[in-house]
Image (cartoon, rainbow, N blue to C red):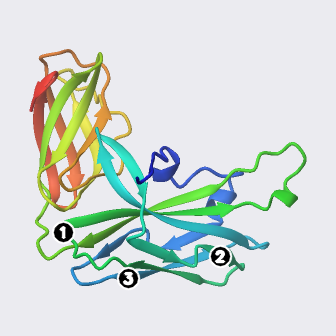
Amino acid sequence: MSRVQTLAPLAFLTTLAAGPAAAQSLQVAPLSIDLPPSATSSVLTLQTDSKEGAAVQARVFRWSQASGEEKLEKTEDVVISPPLLMLRAGTPSTLRLARVTKAPVSGEETYRVIIDEIPDRKKLQAGGVALTVRQSLPVFFAGDDAHQGQLTWRAVDRKGKLVLEATNSGQKRVKLTKLAVIDENNHDLVKNGGLAYVLGGQTKTWELSGAAAGKTLTIKAESDAGPIHASAIAGKSG
């Protein structure tokens, strides 16, 4: 049986670090990988500006959204090599990502590459806390049959809390930025309305605050397909 992991909030941030400078010491390019049909591999370039260099661990997980939440699951369908790497200051190094399963891609497959920069514990002062700088990069493999994502919206009550649901009826993910949910008093109710993805055939949720049941909410966002302007009634289908 596959093991499912929830790495949030770490998996979808790039900020947990031993200090302000540590978060800037590891550079990764590109920040996302979007492979067309028939493509099976890509390369990541890593570099550190730390004079001492940096030890890096890389892992790849299948990425899905269950009950609106982000889920990561161990996979052998996509591999990354080498899984452990020692970076030298100012010298670029590469990681190779490859889809090794022979099964054809259906729709769009989604993964996350998790890259951890591991601090040198020997150099930490006594009593210090060793934290990990983590970067999480989205990876998309497209099938020949993948069609564009299309979102529908609902604002529903879940155990006394109002949440916004975006359901993607298409096969390709929809990338969202600048999400805002405006009530009739022009208040923005959404929490964490920054960068997000709604994966193909799945649902993403956001917690809302301050809306009364039965009130009309206006939903605004930018997407990779253009601006979004929709509405939903709090506590009912949109």
Q: What residue is rendered at 64% in x and 69% in y?
A: 56
Label 2: few (<14), some or many (≥20) within 10 Å?
Answer: some
Dot 2 or dot 1, earlier in sequence: 2
Residue beneath disc 2: 85
Q: What amino acid type is highlighted by mark number 2?
A: Leu
Circle 3 — which element?
strand
Closer to viewer: mark 3 or mark 1: 1
What crowding class fits label 3: few (fewer than 14 Cα within 10 Å), some (14-19), or many (20 or more)? some
Identity of the amino acid at label 3?
Answer: Ser
Q: Are circles 3 and 1 on residues that touch, CB within 8 Å?
A: no
Q: Is residue 60 left or right of residue 70?
A: right
Q: CA distance from mark 3 to mark 2?
A: 19 Å
Mark 2 or 1: the one toward you: 1
Give the left or right position of residue 137, taking residue 210 as reference: right
Which quadrant, please, contains the C terminus?
Answer: top left
- Residue at screen point 61% across, 76% down: 47
Farthest-out residue, front: 1
Q: Which residue is mark 1?
A: 106
Q: Which quadrant of the structure image shows residue 190?
A: top left
* Residue identifier under label 3: 41
Q: Amino acid at mark 1?
A: Ser
Q: Say whether disc 3 or disc 1 marks the residue closer to the N-terminus.
A: 3
* Secondary element at image label 2: strand
Give the secondary structure at mark 1.
loop
Residue at the far right: name it.
126
